[in-house]
């Protein structure tokens, strides 16, 4: 690769980094805007995350969204995602510490996972 190609390549990387920074700033602004809106309603993100809605409440929301010309919420967020039920089922199962093997086996698994995850570290 000659110097001109290298300069062009580095310039494209710089443009990509700048675009990434702009996207991050936009995301941060949206998060701040959401936090302000939730605060005006007396809520926090943590409280919203913990909310569970009944089928009847979701149907009322869908009806209101249709009245406003928007797609129903159930099209975007299904009522009962199958993975949630499975996740809860797996969380309820108590694991036997012996399932993990000896400390050496566990250490070896952790080492392998760490090696595998190395390229994904920031």
Image: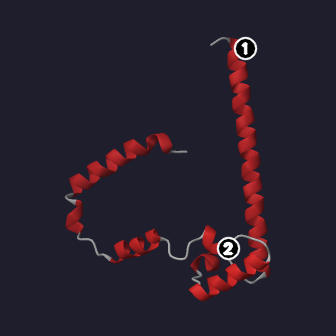
Within 10 Å of disc 2 (Cα), the crowding (few <14, some 14-19, many 20+) is some
Left or right: where does residue 39 sit relative to residue 103? right
Marks 2 and 1: in contact by CB < 8 Å?
Answer: no
Residue drawn at x 74%, y 27% as measured from the top left: 11
- Residue 114 x/y as whole percent: 39, 46
Q: Toward the viewer: 43 or 110? A: 43
According to the image, label 1 marks what residue?
4
Residue 113 in the image: above or below residue 46 = above
Residue 93 in the image: above or below residue 5 = below
Residue drawn at x 73%, y 57% as measured from the top left: 27
Left or right: where does residue 39 sit relative to residue 52? right
| Residue 54 visible in this rendered orientation of the protein | no
According to the image, label 2 marks what residue?
72
Of the image marks 1 and 2, the number of the one nearer the N terminus: 1
Where residue 68 sits, quadrant-wise, is bottom right
**CA gap, disc 1 to disc 2?**
53 Å
Left or right: where does residue 93 sit relative to residue 80? left
Where residue 56 sits, quadrant-wise, is bottom right
Residue drawn at x 33%, y 46% as measured from the top left: 111
Q: The N terminus is located in which quarter?
A: top right
Q: Which mark is residue 111?
A: none
| Residue 81 visible in this rendered orientation of the protein | yes
Numbered disc total: 2
At numbered mark 1, what does the secondary structure look like: helix, strand or loop?
A: helix
Within 10 Å of disc 1 (Cα), the crowding (few <14, some 14-19, many 20+) is few
- Residue 18 x/y as whole percent: 75, 40
Where residue 62 sits, quadrant-wise, is bottom right
Q: The C terminus is located in which quarter?
A: top right
Residue 18 in the image: above or below residue 71 = above
- Residue 88 x/y as whole percent: 41, 75
Which of the two discs, 1 and 2, sits closer to the camera?
2
């Amino acid at each position: 690769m000659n110097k001109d190609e290298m300069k062009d390549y580095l310039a494209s990387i710089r443009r990509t980094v700048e675009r990434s920074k702009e996207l991050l700033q936009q995301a941060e602004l949206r998060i701040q805007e959401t936090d302000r809106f939730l605060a005006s309603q007396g809520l926090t993100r943590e409280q919203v995350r913990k909310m569970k809605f009944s089928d009847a409440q979701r149907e009322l929301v869908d009806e209101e969204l249709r009245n406003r010309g928007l797609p129903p919420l159930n099209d975007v967020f299904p009522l009962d995602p199958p993975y949630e039920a499975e996740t809860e089922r797996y969380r309820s199962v108590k694991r036997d510490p012996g399932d993990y093997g000896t400390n050496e086996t566990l250490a070896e698994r952790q080492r392998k996972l760490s090696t595998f995850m190395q390229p994904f570290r920031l």
